[in-house]
Image: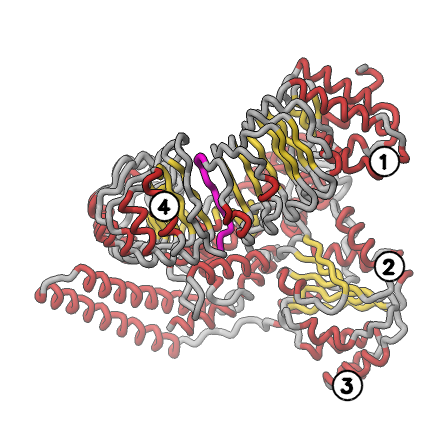
């Protein structure tokens, strides 16, 4: 039955109404069947008496007979009332072909100038070798529109001898692609091209394109293997030919090999560009929105979330509406539904991406429907939820987490999920979903009883998952047999956690996520949720956990971070399937009873309070990948080192000493070769010898280390270090960054190095550094020597630095400003150090007595040559009035333009 449903999902949107009803009935039967299996499993775990087992099996047998009868009835009705075949699905392809055609060219585009210039530069750059530019972005973001602008650009038309536009889609076969290429590039009549075989077309293209400078556009490519064939028919004749590919999947772009290849990601439009485009479409006469409609127009534009396809659809729809306040208000209330209906084309464009997903990825995407709009979800949490739901299956020699992270990257590559936050190494830390894709996920989830969003007091639903986004909610009878996951995004938890609700409605629940909820106490009945895999209590007001939690045999993740819990009192050894135990909170560790050694599936444990028993048991956790242990005494340090040496999979290690008086002796530690992140908080006095062997280390924090010798001489040799923070770690007066050193370092933070007086940066050191923080180093009175040589530095942050330091920084600014233009190539790196803020929201930062300005300011020749000193002086004077303030780029520009009147 599940295979049948998977196949029917693949053609969703193309089915008759009767077929839709039949699929819904079949889905209900599948869900009922799953319930039977879950009830059976729960009965076995409970270990009932013989009489109890007989009763349970009797009920199961009755439910199985009822399911069989339902299946027979549904099948019989299907035969008696066959569905009317839907319209020809080729209509969708024809509509796509029309939308893709370069002849259908919308000249009223807005906000694509920078993207267009990037593409034109690549296409017309004069390089003789064949090259490919891949334009990547989610459905409806404007890839085809941008490609059309470039394709039809007069300079492009003049530059190439031949050009061809091929609408590939996910339906066209390879022979069709080759045929369209032959028609456009070889100018072969359509009938003749259609008569040729695939092999003949390949030979014709390869022999006929020699010496021709051509432009080939492959629009809407889905198959990552297409390029492997296309490259065989494109001659490498140094004629300067170009290929432009549009795709939703970054993997398609990355599959372009054996030629010069670039990728350009197209992002959603800015609000202002979105608003301008909307007005052009909604007010056809002059493109100007009346004052009384501006607020509603802005609200409509926000709902489109920067997606040009949606903006054009909304604008066109509003152009046909009466231009009155009342009429627009009524439309505004239903705009989301209107954009999702089939007539606008928005939902079809996005639905294509969903339908193309491999089946295991579809429920992973749909689960994002439970998250509120404009919210971010951490990578780790999302992966754990997918695993708890059972969406991720075991694979040979691969952990569930590894497989789940591959799922996540596939969804990101397909532009179904956006990266919200990335680490210094580029790894995804948090994700979000575009609003219109979020709407799609909600629509599909509700139609398929996958999940429901509850905004009302009582939602009658048979959905498997409920996202509570209201403060007052009560469960209905339908929930009892279907509910699998509960997500709480409001203060409703006290109501939903009543004992009778937990016992009756949550019986088969796998996920209970109460993060940041107003939870004061968990009922003991929660121990009866034998299917529970994920219990999220982070940020709640809990002070203790019920002892009945030890019954949760299947529990995989227990998250009690940022609660008021100080110790775990139940027998944790009973949680034999536990994979993640997250306990860390600010300033306090959590005591765990004996039994950790029996948790052989444990991969993550944080906030763990050290003890002689605990450090001994850690040696048995051979699957552990992340360990954060606190309050470690000197007596237990050596034993901990011995235990950690046994953890060959460990990639993250954090050790906090119980005091900073006696040295933290970790000399016998031999970290795993997998170790990527290390945080040591305690008195080291000297760096252990094994530091030089941390070849995989990417992130290092040293706190309260009391190092006597300059640590940079050792740390500079770590080949993969990306992030370094020294917090009260060094007690010397001089520090030096040698060359070569820190080959990949991107972020360097020093905090409260109270004795530091001098810091030298050799030219060539830290060649990749992007950001540097210098905080509360009260004796560092001079600017680090060689700072201006850091050509890649984008942001310098100064916090709590003495006036003498700031004064020297101002002198350096003035010295650079008064140099002649002939020195500018050398000084550009210095401008970045002093002025640049790297496209951040706040692009110019003024500190007490000193300044950082945005580079856009100083690029103006007048300011570079004559007025820069005056600008610096102006900011210094302004800083006296506004100490430690922020200057935005807008302020910087306006100040630069009005300098004569200000000074």
Label count reads: 4
> Among all residues in the image, which is located at the extreme left?
51
- Determine the secondary structure under disc 4: helix
Q: Residue 665 is drawn in which quadrant?
A: top left
Circle 3 or circle 1, nearest the eye: 1
Distance CA(mark 1)–CA(mark 4) = 56 Å
Please tell me whether residue 703 belongs to the stretch shown in magenta: no
Q: Which mark is residue 156?
A: 2
Distance CA(mark 3)–CA(mark 4) = 73 Å
* Residue 306 visible in the displayed image: no
The residue wearing badge 4 is 638
**Nearest to N terminus: mark 3 or mark 4:** 3
Q: How is the image coloured?
A: secondary structure
Distance CA(mark 3)–CA(mark 1) = 58 Å
**Looking at the picture, how far across and down is residue 141, in whole percent?**
66, 53
Distance CA(mark 2)–CA(mark 1) = 35 Å
**Looking at the picture, how far across and down is residue 846, in whole percent?**
68, 24
Extent of the magenta region: 674-683
Q: Residue 61 is drawn in which quadrant?
A: bottom left
Q: Quadrant of the image for the N terminus?
A: bottom left
Question: Would residue 390 appear left or right of 271 to someone viewing this image?
Answer: left
- Determine the secondary structure under disc 3: helix
Tags 1 and 4 touching, CB below 8 Å: no
Residue at 59% from the left image edge and 51% from the top image edge: 720
Distance CA(mark 2)–CA(mark 3) = 30 Å
Query: Foreground: 480 or 889?
Result: 889
Tags 4 and 2 touching, CB below 8 Å: no
Q: Is residue 569 above or below residue 554?
A: above
Tags 3 and 4 touching, CB below 8 Å: no
Q: Is residue 778 above or below residue 667?
A: above
């Amino acid at each position: 039955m599940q295979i049948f449903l998977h196949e029917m999902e693949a053609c969703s949107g193309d089915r008759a109404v009767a077929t839709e009803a039949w699929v819904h009935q079949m889905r209900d039967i599948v869900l009922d069947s799953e319930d039977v299996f879950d009830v059976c499993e729960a009965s076995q775990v409970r270990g009932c008496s013989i009489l109890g087992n007989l009763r349970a099996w009797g009920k199961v047998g009755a439910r199985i007979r009822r399911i069989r009868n339902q299946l027979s009835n549904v099948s019989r009705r299907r035969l008696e009332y066959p569905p009317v075949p839907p319209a020809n699905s080729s209509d969708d392809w024809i509509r796509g072909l029309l939308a893709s055609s370069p002849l259908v060219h919308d000249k009223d585009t807005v906000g694509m100038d920078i993207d267009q210039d990037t593409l034109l530069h690549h296409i017309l750059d004069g390089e003789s070798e064949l090259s490919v530019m891949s334009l990547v972005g989610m459905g409806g973001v404007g890839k085809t529109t941008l490609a059309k602008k470039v394709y039809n650009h007069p300079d492009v038309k003049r530059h190439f001898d031949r050009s061809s536009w091929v609408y590939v889609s996910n339906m066209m076969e390879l022979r069709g692609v080759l045929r369209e290429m032959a028609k456009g590039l070889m100018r072969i009549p359509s009938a003749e091209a259609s008569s040729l075989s695939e092999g003949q077309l390949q030979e014709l293209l390869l022999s006929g394109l020699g010496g021709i400078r051509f432009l080939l556009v492959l629009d809407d490519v889905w198959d990552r293997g297409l390029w492997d064939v296309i490259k065989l028919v494109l001659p490498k004749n140094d004629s300067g030919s170009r290929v432009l590919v549009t795709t939703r999947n970054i993997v398609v772009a990355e599959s372009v090999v054996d030629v010069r290849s670039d990728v350009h990601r197209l992002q959603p439009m800015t609000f202002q560009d979105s608003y301008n485009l909307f007005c052009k479409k909604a007010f056809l006469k002059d493109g100007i929105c009346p004052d009384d409609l501006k607020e509603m127009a802005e609200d409509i534009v926000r709902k489109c979330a920067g997606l040009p396809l949606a903006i054009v659809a909304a604008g066109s729809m509003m152009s046909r509406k009466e231009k009155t306040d009342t009429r627009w208000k009524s439309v505004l209330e239903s705009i989301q539904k209107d954009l999702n209906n089939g007539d606008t084309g928005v939902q079809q464009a996005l639905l294509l991406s969903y339908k193309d997903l491999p089946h295991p990825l579809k429920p992973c995407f749909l689960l994002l429907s439970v998250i509120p709009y404009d919210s971010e979800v951490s990578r780790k949490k999302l992966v754990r939820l997918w695993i708890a739901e059972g969406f991720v299956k075991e694979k040979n020699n691969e952990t569930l987490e590894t497989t789940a992270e591959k799922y996540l990257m596939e969804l990101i590559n397909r532009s179904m999920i956006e990266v919200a936050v990335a680490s210094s190494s580029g790894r995804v830390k948090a994700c979000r979903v575009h609003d219109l894709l979020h709407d799609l996920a909600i629509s599909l989830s509700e139609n398929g009883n996958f999940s429901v969003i509850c905004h009302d007091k009582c939602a009658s639903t048979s959905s498997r998952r409920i996202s509570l986004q209201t403060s007052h909610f009560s469960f209905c009878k339908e929930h009892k047999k279907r509910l699998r996951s509960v997500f709480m995004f409001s203060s409703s938890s006290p109501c939903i956690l009543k004992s009778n609700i937990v016992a009756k409605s949550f019986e088969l629940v796998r996920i209970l996520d109460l993060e940041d909820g107003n939870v004061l106490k968990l009922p003991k009945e929660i121990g009866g949720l034998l299917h529970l895999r994920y219990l999220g209590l982070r940020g709640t007001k809990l002070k203790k956990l019920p002892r009945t939690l030890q019954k949760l045999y299947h529990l995989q993740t227990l998250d009690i971070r940022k609660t008021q819990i100080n110790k775990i009192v139940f027998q944790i050894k009973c949680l034999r399937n536990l994979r993640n135990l997250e306990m860390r909170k600010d300033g306090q560790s959590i005591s765990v009873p004996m039994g950790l050694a029996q948790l052989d599936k444990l991969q993550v444990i944080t906030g763990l309070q050290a003890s002689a028993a605990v450090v001994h048991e850690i040696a048995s956790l051979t699957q552990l990948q992340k360990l954060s242990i606190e309050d470690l005494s000197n007596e237990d340090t050596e034993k901990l080192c011995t235990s950690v040496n046994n953890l060959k999979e460990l990639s993250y290690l954090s050790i906090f000493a119980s005091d900073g008086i006696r040295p933290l002796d970790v000399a016998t530690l031999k970290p795993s070769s997998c170790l990527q992140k290390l945080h040591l908080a305690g008195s080291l006095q000297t760096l252990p010898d094994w530091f030089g062997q941390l070849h995989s280390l990417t992130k290092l924090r040293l706190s309260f280390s009391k190092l006597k010798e300059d640590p940079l001489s050792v740390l500079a040799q770590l080949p993969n270090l990306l992030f370094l923070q020294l917090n009260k770690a060094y007690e010397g007066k001089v520090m030096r960054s040698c060359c070569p050193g820190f080959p990949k370092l991107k972020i360097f933070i020093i905090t409260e190095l109270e004795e530091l007086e001098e810091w030298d940066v050799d030219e060539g050191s830290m060649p990749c550094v992007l950001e540097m923080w210098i905080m509360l180093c009260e004796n560092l009175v001079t600017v680090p020597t060689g700072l201006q040589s850091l050509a890649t530095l984008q942001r310098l942050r100064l916090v709590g630095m003495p006036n003498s330091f700031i004064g020297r920084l101002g002198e350096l600014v003035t010295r650079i400003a008064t140099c002649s233009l002939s020195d500018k190539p050398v000084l550009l790196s210095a401008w970045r150090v002093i002025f640049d803020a790297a496209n951040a929201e706040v692009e110019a930062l003024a500190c007490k007595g000193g300044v950082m300005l945005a580079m856009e300011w100083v690029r103006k020749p007048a300011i570079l040559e004559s007025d820069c000193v005056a600008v610096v002086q102006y900011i210094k004077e302004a800083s006296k009035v506004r100490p430690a303030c922020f200057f935005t780029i807008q302020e910087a520009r306006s100040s630069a333009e009005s300098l004569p009147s200000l000074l």
